Image: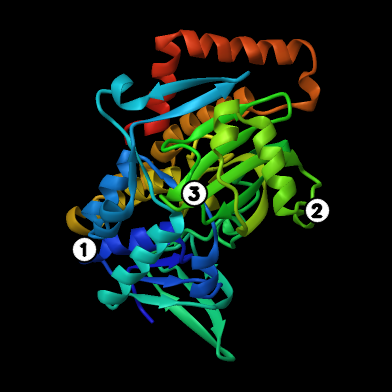
């Protein structure tokens, strides 16, 4: 098979890149190691920055999001029983976010690619990129007992943290920066109305909690837990009681509990790989960076990568200029590190750290009290939350 851009990874990053390129007449093929059902079964982010919302509309995949998504102009931070609303729209000149699940974004993108006869190879084994530092890269994969080859101009590595793309960059060139946090998030999805019409980020002596949602009758809740915890140790009753113990009294009173339809524990880490390019390979999304879910930057950061990368490919094929491709890594990393700082700051602000006992706890309390009292601090939080410009 021959194409212009071979995309490794069939998650939202790879699908969005393929969709954008298709609309500009640029050929691509997506190769995904998992099944489509597996990709669509992953429960991930649900808060979309304005930049991603605009990209989805421009790519022709925003209709269902606009019908079913929930625009949010603010959110609450709770501390010691008090709730402070962060008025994102008021503090940022009218900017907002959209609550719409990553699973739904992925489904919309799959539907769009199918309607346009996009080529997506699912359940490909032993996917391997070759000759990346030449003008004729290609990838190989196994399927149906046969070896297949895709010749291409470029390879886009959109295959996540555990994928093969980043590993194809020589260790002598690749630099990795990582911080692993000493806790995880225990998340529950339930078919219950959300406790609030906007998100509540909660700091308590028992640890962090987040009240979120996917729609008017599908709620997503999280509690901070020890990294070694097992999901099997958490019954629904235990989860709901722990969540209520961390919330302000009014939210605990209004919480509607019900059976969980999904329950999982996610570890928290900050990770950045540099550079994001090697020869004709370009990394995007989780293949190049991971942020803690605090602040909802994971999918949105992947979207900004795709913005820069798609623009670079379009410029190459329409104008014959490789400037955007040469500058892709440096350009994308500037925004990545700013989002990394914001996610680290929110994580540090809201979670219970074992080593913080005493002085660290008082600093945390004071930081939250300052945030509640300072419009300038709230503005800085709001402008990062709605998303920095591309």
Placement of 59 over or under 5, stated as above or below: above
Q: Residues within 10 Å of mark 2 (few under 14, many from 20)?
A: few
Q: For the point 76% across and 19% down, which residue is it?
A: 356
Q: For the point 65% across and 56% down, which residue is it?
A: 263
> Which element type, helix, strand or loop, lies under badge 1?
helix
Q: CA distance from mark 1 to mark 3?
A: 26 Å
Residue ranking furthest to the front: 253
> Which element type, helix, strand or loop, lies under badge 3?
loop
Location of mark 1 (residue)? 23
Which picture quadrant has residue 241? top right
Kindly tell me whether residue 277 is visible in this rendering.
Answer: no
User: Marks 2 and 1: in contact by CB < 8 Å?
Assistant: no
**Is 117 positioned to the left or the right of 125 in the image?**
left
Residue closest to the eye, 100 or 14: 100
Residue closest to the eye, 326 or 298: 298
Q: For the point 66% across and 28% down, which residue is it?
A: 351
Placement of 130 over or under 166, stated as above or below: below
> Which element type, helix, strand or loop, lies under badge 2?
helix
Return the disc, 3 or 2, that comes first in the chain's sequence.
3
**Mark number displayed over residue 45:** 3
**Is 224 positioned to the left or the right of 197 in the image?**
right
User: Marks 2 and 3: in contact by CB < 8 Å?
Assistant: no
Could you tell me residue 238's position as x and y percent? 75, 47
Could you tell me residue 94's position as x and y percent? 25, 27
Could you tell me residue 38's position as x and y percent? 55, 70
Kindly tell me whether residue 295 is visible in this rendering.
Answer: yes
Location of mark 2 (residue)? 233
Q: CA distance from mark 1 to mark 2?
A: 48 Å
Which picture quadrant has residue 260? bottom right
Q: Quadrant of the N terminus?
A: bottom left
Could you tell me residue 5's position as x and y percent? 36, 66
């Amino acid at each position: 098979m021959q194409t212009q851009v071979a995309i490794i990874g069939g998650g939202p990053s790879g699908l969005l890149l393929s969709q954008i390129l298709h609309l500009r007449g640029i050929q691509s093929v997506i190769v995904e190691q998992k099944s489509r059902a597996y990709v669509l079964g992953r429960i991930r982010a649900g808060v979309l920055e304005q930049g991603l919302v605009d990209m989805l509309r421009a790519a022709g995949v925003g209709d269902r999001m606009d019908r079913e998504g929930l625009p949010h102009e603010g959110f609450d931070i709770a501390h010691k029983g008090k709730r402070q609303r962060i008025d994102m729209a008021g503090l940022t000149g009218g900017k907002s976010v959209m609550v719409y699940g990553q699973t739904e974004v992925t489904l919309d993108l799959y539907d769009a690619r199918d309607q346009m006869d996009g080529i997506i190879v699912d359940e490909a084994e032993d996917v391997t990129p070759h000759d990346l530092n030449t003008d004729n890269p290609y990838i190989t994969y196994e399927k149906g007992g046969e070896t297949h080859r895709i010749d291409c101009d470029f390879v886009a590595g959109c295959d996540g943290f555990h994928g093969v793309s980043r590993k194809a960059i020589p260790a002598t060139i690749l630099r990795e920066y990582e911080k692993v946090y000493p806790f995880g998030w225990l998340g529950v999805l339930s078919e219950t109305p959300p406790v609030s019409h906007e998100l509540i980020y909660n700091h308590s002596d028992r640890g962090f909690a987040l009240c979120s949602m996917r729609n008017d009758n599908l709620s997503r809740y999280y509690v901070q837990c020890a990294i070694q915890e097992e999901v099997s140790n958490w019954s629904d009753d235990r989860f709901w009681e722990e969540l209520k113990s961390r919330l302000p009294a009014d939210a605990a009173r209004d919480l509607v509990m019900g059976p969980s339809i999904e329950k999982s524990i996610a570890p928290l880490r900050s990770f950045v790989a540099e550079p994001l390019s090697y020869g004709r390979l370009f990394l995007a999304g989780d293949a190049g960076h991971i942020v803690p879910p605090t602040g909802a930057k994971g999918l949105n950061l992947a979207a900004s990568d795709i913005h820069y990368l798609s623009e670079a490919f379009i410029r190459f094929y329409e104008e014959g200029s490789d400037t955007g491709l040469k500058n892709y890594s440096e350009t994308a990393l500037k925004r990545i590190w700013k989002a990394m700082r914001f996610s680290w700051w929110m994580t540090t602000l809201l979670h219970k750290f074992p080593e913080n006992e005493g002085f660290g706890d008082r600093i945390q309390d004071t930081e939250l009290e300052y945030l509640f009292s300072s419009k300038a601090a709230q503005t800085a939080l709001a402008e990062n939350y709605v998303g920095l410009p591309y």
